[in-house]
Amino acid sequence: MTIREATTADVPRLVALTRRFIATSGYAAVLADNPAAVTALVTYLIEDPAGLVLVADTGTGAEDAVVGLLGVALTPSLYSGERVVVETIWWVEPAARGPGLALLRAAERWAAEQGAVRIEMMAPVDGLGPRVGRLYQRRGYRAVETHYVAPVVPAMTALTVVDDVLPDVTAYVAAARARPFGDLRGNGLVFHGMAVPPDDSVPQAIATRWPALTPTLSLLRQSPAGQVEPHLIHTDDDMGDWTAILYLTETPPDGDGTTFYRQRATGALTSAAATAVDAAWDDLTQWEPWATVPAKPHRLLLFPSGYFHARALPENYGAGDTARLIQVTFGTGALASGGGMLWV
């Protein structure tokens, strides 16, 4: 068995070994199978002077002659600036586990030659992990951190829902319905069914409950069936840091509310993380919903203004006093995030 540095000719075999490692370890549950990314990583470690891939080669010349690899990278420590060598992949085929220690020794020698002050190796928590940990300890390594991973999911977002915000919602809705509704023009768009609220009780309620938030604009919006809207899916990021929607329809139909979307191409929930989507706001094939907050009379929904969202019933509904009625408020200040949808 020969321990040698890998060459670019080894890349296809190294990619196959790396993918097998991922598929047979706990990483299979959290990592996507991406051969192109693995190929790029292995190639970088082989070609860059700060990288190294060592292989265990049986010398048979066969396609599967390489039975193991250890990839490391030389990098400054994020905390101290010291030169450290960090493992990226260490895998030996189960039927040929003998050369694993020889690979580690060769990596340690390379680290010393590069002037590194520390080498950092990993061990999985399942399978051979405990055995690998004992090997490290016998060679003078010590455990300093356990690595935890979790998928980033919509439950980590900043949706806040509060019911019963105003003391007399019936009187407030009656006063709101009596307001004169008309068109509002802005950013080259026409927003129909807009009106000034009867008073500032909604912004005051928001500022009182969340002192860190400062309301800057609040408007009523009445949306009868068939009303033409500028867009379906949209963001309010040009209006401030957060948006609040107060549902005021006395008897909303089933399905009414606000739906939040992610961009299929990027997985992004917000405009800040997305690619250009100016031509795709009404193309639902480019979006997927991840949450819907049902409309309920007197329910207030708050969320960061950059979130992609839309009315849950695209066609709107009703007419006159039965039309969809909301009050939307914009403002500045940071909403709390994380822990799932917060119902207060």
Image: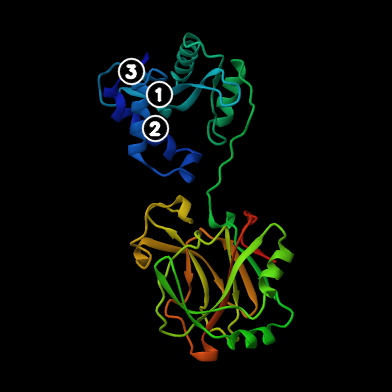
Contact, CB < 8 Å: mark 2 with mark 3? Answer: no
Q: Mark 3: which secondary structure?
A: loop
Question: Which residue sits at x=38%, y=43%?
Answer: 33
330 vs 100, left or right, is: right
How far apart are the alpha carbons under marks 3 and 1?
A: 12 Å
First reached walking from the N terminus: tag 2 or tag 1: 2
Pointer 3: residues within 10 angstroms few (<14), some, or many (20+)? some
Pointer 1: residues within 10 angstroms few (<14), some, or many (20+)? many
Residue topped by disc 1: 69
Q: Is residue 195 above or below residue 319?
A: above
Q: Is residue 344 above or below residue 306?
A: below
- The answer to whether one can see residue 231 in this image is no
Q: Amino acid at mark 3?
A: Thr
Q: Is residue 256 above or below residue 81?
A: below
Contact, CB < 8 Å: mark 2 with mark 1? Answer: yes
Residue topped by disc 3: 58
Question: In the figure, residue 336 lies in which quadrant?
Answer: bottom right
Quadrant where the image shows the N terminus: top left
Q: Position of residue 205 (x, y in %)?
A: 71, 70
Q: Nearer the viewer, residue 308 or 177?
A: 177
Q: Position of residue 341 (x, y in %)?
A: 61, 62
How far apart are the alpha carbons under marks 2 and 3?
A: 18 Å
Q: Amino acid at mark 1?
A: Leu
64 vs 288, left or right, is: left
Residue topped by disc 2: 18
Q: Nearer the viewer, residue 318 or 230?
A: 230
Contact, CB < 8 Å: mark 3 with mark 1? Answer: no
Q: Position of residue 57 (x, y in %)?
A: 34, 18
Observer-side mark, 3 or 1, equals 1
Q: Position of residue 170 (x, y in %)?
A: 68, 86
First reached walking from the N terminus: tag 2 or tag 3: 2
